Amino acid sequence: MTRHQVRVVLPCAGAGSRLGLPFPKELAPLSPGRVLIDSSLDLIRACAADVRVILMTDGRREATARYVRDRLPGISVAEILQDPDAPDMTEAVLCLEPWLGYANVLLLPDVLYSWAGDPVGEVAEAAVSYGFAVAAVKAGPEQVRDAGALRTANGRVTAFEDKPADPSPYEALWGMLAFTNGSFGLDGLRLVAASASKARTGPVADPPVAGAPVVWLAGFRDCGTWDRYLAELREP
């Protein structure tokens, strides 16, 4: 467990166009009383560190903010507007720098995590030790092709690429990013953002992404598209 306060960033500013829902996608129902974002909220509640939440929104997420606060009693939740000029989610997180703490964890609210222990606390501690860290899950080529792909060795990232045309060099994908609020940690986010926006093509093999410690998750299911969301609803 990290002794530092952990700030968890939940990006909830997307239009949800891939799902086409009439409400925020993070509130898409999964079962009675349970919605997509609950998986991230479970992780936050399980964290043994002192946690603060930054809810990054588009300014029209009153229902989401109310839901998150209701389910995280005793945890500070600050709603911050996403920079409208940020070209993608990772760039928008970089714009949060004035509100970030020393140790920060980026969760994905349209993802269902499977885990044991305290991965938020563990990945935050790993970031404190190195500056940047990832929580990842082993994945096959089809999953890797559509996500943030990782190649790892000896518990460290050796290369990263977002949605690689050739997934064969990769065996995992990231489910959380953790970083310190300093030049080294934020450089990791900048490398991920450059890859996501295709400002940089090909694998990233530079620190702090290369060399970053990996905390392994048990599972990771992206529900951000209609077919994946429906598949989740069909699960027994």
Image (tube, rainbow, N blue to C red):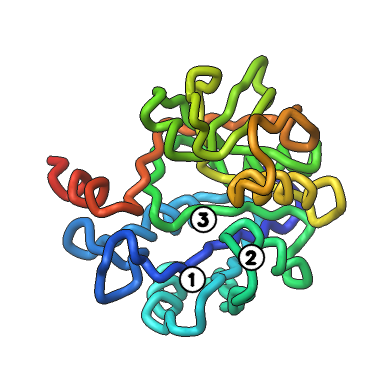
**Is residue 60 positioned above or below 143 on the image?**
below
Q: Is residue 223 left or right of residue 9?
A: left
Circle 1: element type: loop
Question: Quadrant of the rendered structure where residue 28 is?
Answer: bottom left
Which mark, residue 13? 1
Inter-mark Cα distance, 1 to 3: 19 Å
Q: Residue at x 59, y 48 (%)?
A: 196
Question: Of all residues shown, which one is farthest toward the right?
Answer: 183
Q: Amino acid at mark 3?
A: Ile
Which mark, residue 44? 3
Inter-mark Cα distance, 2 to 3: 21 Å
Q: Quadrant of the C terminus?
A: top left
- Nearer to us of marks 1 and 3 is 1
Residue placed most toward the observer, 188 or 134: 188
Could you classify mark 3 by the number of other residues whose Cα lies within 10 Å: few (under 14), some (14-19), or many (20 or more)?
Answer: many
Q: Residue at x 80, y 34 (%)?
A: 207
Q: Quadrant of the N terminus?
A: top right
User: Looking at the image, do the residues carrying marks 2 and 1 touch, with CB atoms under 8 Å apart?
Assistant: yes
Q: Residue at x 40, y 71 (%)?
A: 15
Q: Amino acid at mark 1?
A: Ala
Residue 36 percent coordinates (x, y): 33, 58
Q: Amino acid at mark 2?
A: Ala
Q: Residue at x 25, y 75 (%)?
A: 22
